Image (spheres, rainbow, N blue to C red):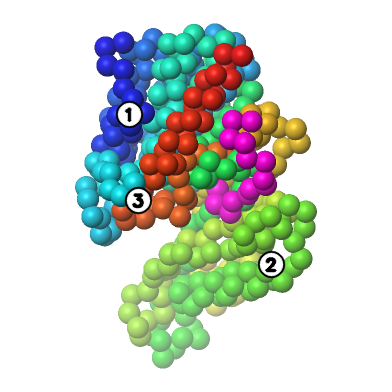
Amino acid sequence: MSSLLTPRQIFEKLVSFPTVSRDGNLALVDWVEGYLAEAGIAASRVWNPARSKAGLYAHAGPQVAGGVMLSGHSDVVPVDGQDWSSDPWELTERGGRLYGRGACDMKGFDALAIWAMVEAQRAEVARPLQLALTYDEEFGCLGAPPLIAQMAREGFPKAAAVVVGEPSMMQVVTGHKGNIGFGIRLRGHEVHSSLQHRGVSAVMEAGRLIQWANEANDRNRARAPEGDDGLFDPPWTSVHVGEIAGGTAQNITAADCRMGLDYRCVPSDSLEACRAALLAEVARIEAGMKAVHPEAGIAVEETFSVPALAPEQDGAAEALARRLTGDNATHVVSYATEAGQFQEGGFSTVVCGPGDIAQAHQPDEYITLEQFRQGEAFMTRLLAHLQE
């Protein structure tokens, strides 16, 4: 191999690609694919429908099932409007920290995984190591399902354990909430606001839906946690509206309103039940709107759906991650990851990666040198495990 790189050098290269979800990731994918090819590792691409983005998966070692897959995403959130102390697209060391967009979420882990793949190939490991690199995780975990489906169609050797390297401070996370999101558009009927009773305000009807979300949160908060629900913070299903826009003028009932709504569901609440509850409330509000004007209404589009990661009984991924980290405590998180999708696809899966999730998406995003070193130590122990 003409240019064997250290984990730090790979990390620097990955951060240099501005892979904001809206803009694509093909330059990064080209580089990763080429670097793996230099080591004799073939990668397969998984394209988005527009072929403007791609994920990839690769295999090092014997062509058999039962290995370990390291999974990460290539996309990052924007830096627009954020006050950075250094170039976000250049990995910069200051005070024991490595700064850059994606440094924590999650190009640090990606760099370590790519390094480990090359080392596994060079060492001719006894059991395979695999890499999965996705697109559009930040857009609702859209890139993992087609990658998982394509691996199955092509008969890619199935891993016994998947480690999704989202930042967990190298703790072994065995559960996370499910997440489902909706884009909602309310269509009203315009009249002068002095005749409000003859019109339908899309904005005010949206307010009814927001109030319903507030009341759902109050009910869920008051309910005693069931089973594993109590492990989460908060230990209930939450409903959130983060964006809303509509209306034409203060003295006109709003003809249009758009909003986003999402759920973060504890294990005792299924995504299906959450979806049904929302649609039932939408139907109730819409009926009142149509009673005033028949052309008023509400359109609901499901924008993403990410299954929960459930703790596994005697899970192979959990056992492996605990062995490699020495972490025997119980950890769950309230944010969603691609881990639930791998688990739904039939893989034993955990979340375990370097960095603190509190740094994700922040200006001056960073990972500490100590966390990056802990991640490298994890990979070194994993490579030794694959030789056993």
Mark 3: secondary structure: loop
Q: Residue at x 75, y 61 (%)?
A: 225
Residue, far bottom: 194
| Residue with the mark numbered 2 | 220
Percent x, y of residue 238? 60, 62
Query: Badge 2: few (under 14), some or many (20 or more) residues near its Cα, within 10 Å?
Result: some
Measured as percent of width and height from the top left, residue 22 is found at 33, 45
- In the structure shown, which secondary structural element does the residue marked by tag 2 occupy? helix
Residue 135 seen: no
Q: Height in image: 49 above or below 151?
A: below
What segment is highlighted magenta in the picture? 323-343
Q: Nearer the viewer, residue 332 or 18?
A: 332
Q: Is residue 244 above or below residue 345?
A: below
Three-letter amino acid code of the residue under disc 3: Glu
Instruction: Classify the position of the C terminus by image quarter.
Output: top right
Query: How far apart, in angstroms, are the residues tagged by discs 3 and 1?
Result: 18 Å
State yes or no: residue 134 in magenta. no
Determine the secondary structure under disc 1.
helix
| Residue 35 visible in image | yes
* Residue under pointer 3: 365
Marker disc for residue 10 = 1
Q: Are marks 2 and 3 in contact (CB under 8 Å)?
A: no
